[in-house]
Amino acid sequence: MDLLIIFISAAVVNNFVLIYFLGICPFLGVSNKLEKAFSMGLAATFVMVLAALVTWLINNLILIPFGLPFLQYVSFIIVIASLVQFVEMFIRKMSPTLYRALGIFLPLITTNCAILGMALLAALRDYNFIQSVVFGFAAGIGFTLALLIMAGIREELEMAPIPEPFKGAPITLIIAGLLALAFMGFAGLISG
Amino acid sequence: MAEGKVKRNLVFEFTKGLWGENPVFRQLLGMCPTLAVTTSSVNGFSMGMATSFVLICSSTIISLIRKLIPNQVRIASYIVVIATFVTMADLFLKGNFPDISKALGPFVPLIVVNCIILGRAEAYASKHTPLQALVDALGMGVGFTLALTVLGTIREILGSGTLFGVLNFEPWVVMILPGGAFITLGLLIGLLNFIKERTGKPASAPACPID
């Protein structure tokens, strides 16, 4: 039950992109085509689950017992960066098909603030191991969801007569605003 | 002659961050904190200052050690330098301004992955002298702070319905909510594009740094 609430809260009610404003860069940059958006979401979800797992271990087995929580930011970002690198090498060796699908999106994930944000939020809320991993997975699903909805709308938008100054980023931001309002409708789904 | 040229060059390096290459309105960098913390002008301003501090320090340091860093590990080295200054800024805010630190929440540590800082390190500081890097970072920092303060002020006026106690109308709660952040920024960028178009300069819409 507890895990279900964490999942729904991170994926829908407090959607990482639309409510927490994490991962806005890929949200604006990669949301113009459905396929690209899906690959990006998949890659991010994959890294998020791994990052949740590894950062929890580092935080609770190394940083906290040795009284080094001030090294949290440095160590988390290094872990995420090397994790991404490692995953990229691993996928390239193991599954060329998957690599072609995710390939160029993997390096971009290092600077995706949704990953680091997820790790920091999980540490801040004192989640246990299972909760952290579920939280990471849910955050990835929420990110993918927002990206897919946006990509679907933007594909339709290509035909729309948008005033010249509003083309590109401005109209995307305004649509994101309307989506964020729509997502607020989920707020009653869980209490607290 | 040469000295005058250098000076004018430095002035240009500073002013380009304010308008022509404003990180928020022109380059669309650092969107996450821009949208998240601008619920009030104070929050926007503090976030801008914290980011500027990290940007200025890390740009200068990176420019100083640019010849020592091997090319293959440069991004990792930049991130370590940046994360160090972010930790300093975070501890400083926690110690001296606990209220602001609480309001900004996880967005202070997230300065580490703010693309303005890594972007300036990679595109500018790693190729220029420390003085140039410092001035460039100063301009970008001021431009970022300015953009955040403007956005925060607009949202505060409309969302809380107050401006120095003069105005008094039913506040638009939506402006404080996440949706209001996206819509305000979208309209602002659109407006600036419109102004740029009118003044004759071609409105370049730079893509997000990640693609």
Image (cartoon, coloured by chain):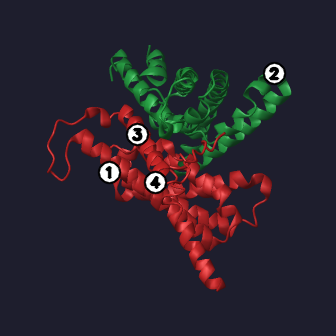
Chain colours: A green, B red
Report x, y in % for residue B144.
47, 55
Residue drawn 59% across the image and 31% down it = A52
B131 lies above or below B144: below
Asked if the residue under mark 3 is in contact with the one under mark 2, i.e. CB atoms within 8 Å, the reply is no
Asked if the residue under mark 1 is in contact with the one under mark 2, i.e. CB atoms within 8 Å, the reply is no
Q: Which residue is mark 4?
A: B90
Q: CA distance from mark 1 to mark 3?
A: 18 Å
Chain letter, disc 2 residue:
A
Q: Which residue is mark 1?
A: B41
Q: Which tag is nearer the camera, tag 2 or tag 3?
A: 3
Given the image, on which type of amino acid does mark 1 rest? Ser
Bin the neighbour count of mark 3 within 10 Å (Cα to Cα): few under 14, some 14-19, many 20 and up: some
* Numbered disc 2: secondary structure: helix
Q: Which residue is mark 2?
A: A97
Given the image, on which type of amino acid does mark 3 rest? Leu
* Numbered disc 3: secondary structure: helix
Q: CA distance from mark 1 to mark 4?
A: 20 Å
Name the image quarter holding residue B7. bottom right
- Tell me the quarter of the image containing the N terminus of chain B: bottom right
Residue drawn 39% across the image and 21% down it = A182
Q: Which tag is nearer the camera, tag 2 or tag 4?
A: 2
Q: Which residue is mark 3?
A: B187
Q: CA distance from mark 2 to mark 4?
A: 42 Å
Given the image, on which type of amino acid does mark 4 rest? Asp
Among numbered discs 4 and 3, the one appearing first in the sequence: 4
* Numbered disc 1: secondary structure: helix
Q: CA distance from mark 4 to mark 3?
A: 32 Å
* Numbered disc 4: secondary structure: helix
Among numbered discs 1 and 4, the one appearing first in the sequence: 1
